[in-house]
Image (spheres, rainbow, N blue to C red):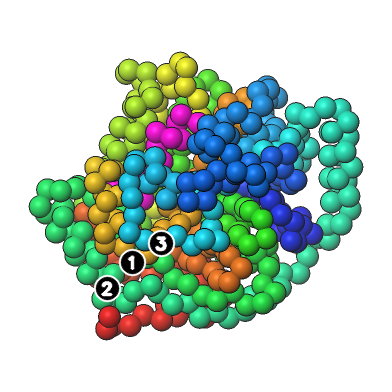
Amino acid sequence: MGDVLAVLEGEPWLACLDSGSEIMPRGRWTILCRDPVHVVEAHAGRCFVDRREQAGDALEILRGLIPAFACPDGMPFVGGAIGFADYRFGQRTHGLSTRHDPDPQQPEFAAGIYDHAIIMDRLERRAWLTGYGTPDVMARRRREVMDLWGRVVAHAPLPKMPDIQFTMERSARGYRRAVAQACDYIAAGDIFQVNITARMWGARPPGLSPIAAYRALRVTSAAPFGAFLSCGPDFALLSASPERFVALDVHGVMRTRPIKGTAPRDPDPVRDRQRAQDLRLDEKECAENLMIVDLMRNDLGQLARIGSVSVPELFNVEHFTHVHHLVSEVQATLLPGHDAIDLLRATLPPGSVTGAPKHRAMQIIDELEGSARGPYCGVVFRIGGDGAMDSSVIIRTLVMTRAGICAAAGGGITILSDPQKEYEEMCLKVSALLSVFGNTSSGEKEHD
């Protein structure tokens, strides 16, 4: 996949949902789309379609642009919408204000409507061109794909990434203080859990390509829900997310797989297995996971048939390049008369990166965190013409604008949290992102 991406350098509105993991079936498919038919964006609550402002809600506008068509058996996606909704977009769905100023270069919501898709199957090692366009449109798409394949050079060399100094938005002491304050809220009975995060920024060197940086990221941090989204010339999302948010199949079955609980990998296989086992039995990590399972049961339950909500997996340990994670699954059946757009609206932003109760946790997040989350803790999604949807939580993600690069990480805080250990977990998670650029210093200061 990296060789294909290499020849698409600089292409605007490129969408790649990139399975770069051995976890099957969630790590099976890669979906590549180019040249959207329409583009929907939202900036500070204002919506634009093909760069023209349009009254209305971005999700409702998107619903009206996705055509309805059948998807052949065995294909995950034939065309439709691919995009993202950031954390602020989720705040708006809850009617919440924020004290943080957004980055004007970053859209709150962006999606392309694609009449085709290149589908790559990692299991069978095959690729297809799919689409819903007219015969003339699909003939043109086939010519474009043949031209693309003709330009692909096997084992295209990956440019060396520059060393970049990243600076954390606040000191290590400031992060620990925020965690301690969150624990105070929990002890007072205000909330059960809250996710506290931090961001780090580095200057983007002239000439650094988002695709080159993404290719480097996918080499070091393969993930089942990787994504590259280029939204115009000044913004790109480079994600190595391990976490599915909400999936909806054509039969109306909803699935979500919240991640809560983290332990570092160990190069020694025996110690590594022990760390995974310790994670599975850790009281704090299991409590953290269980509270988010309950939250997601509630979120899905808003649109679920009565009696259909279930938890088929609880406290399953999954293994990634740098960490073990504790993962559970919640399932439910969608009520008749509702669709993927309704499901997104009801569940944004993801409960695993907010807390419980969700509304109050989001208010505390805004109080305690040092900057706007932006795309981080939002959602990447695809919605097909058959009504099926899949989505991922925007974590383990780099955000590139014209001027800079942002990396972020955090963790769930419970009454059992230790501020120093939470700080160390945050650093562990963000280290995989910073290591792409060699110099991993967070620029931390012990004095505010």
Magenta-drawn stretch contains 292: no
Residue 419's image quarter? bottom left
Question: Residue 91 placed where, x, y %?
Answer: 37, 46
Disc 2 packing (10 Å; few <14; some 14–19; many ≥20): some
Q: Is residue 136 left or right of residue 199?
A: right
Residue in view at x 62 percent, y 37 percent: 81
Q: Is residue 279 visible?
A: no
Q: Is residue 431 visible?
A: yes
Q: Secondary structure at mark 2?
A: helix
Q: Secondary structure at mark 3?
A: loop
Looking at the rendering, the stretch of residues picked out in magenta corresponds to: 341-355
**Main SS of the magenta segment?**
helix
Residue at label 1? Answer: 370
Q: Which mark is residue 174?
A: 2
Query: Which amino acid does the dot numbered 2 rest on?
Result: Gly
**Mark closest to the chain's N terminus, 3 or 2:** 3
Nearest-to-viewer mark from 3 and 2: 3
Residue in view at x 39 percent, y 40 percent: 93
Depth order, front residue of 210/22: 210
Question: Residue 174 placed where, x, y %?
Answer: 27, 73
Q: Are marks 2 and 1 in contact (CB under 8 Å)?
A: yes
Residue at label 3? Answer: 101
Depth order, front residue of 349/149: 349
Q: Which mark is residue 215?
A: none
Query: Which amino acid does the dot numbered 3 rest on?
Result: Asp
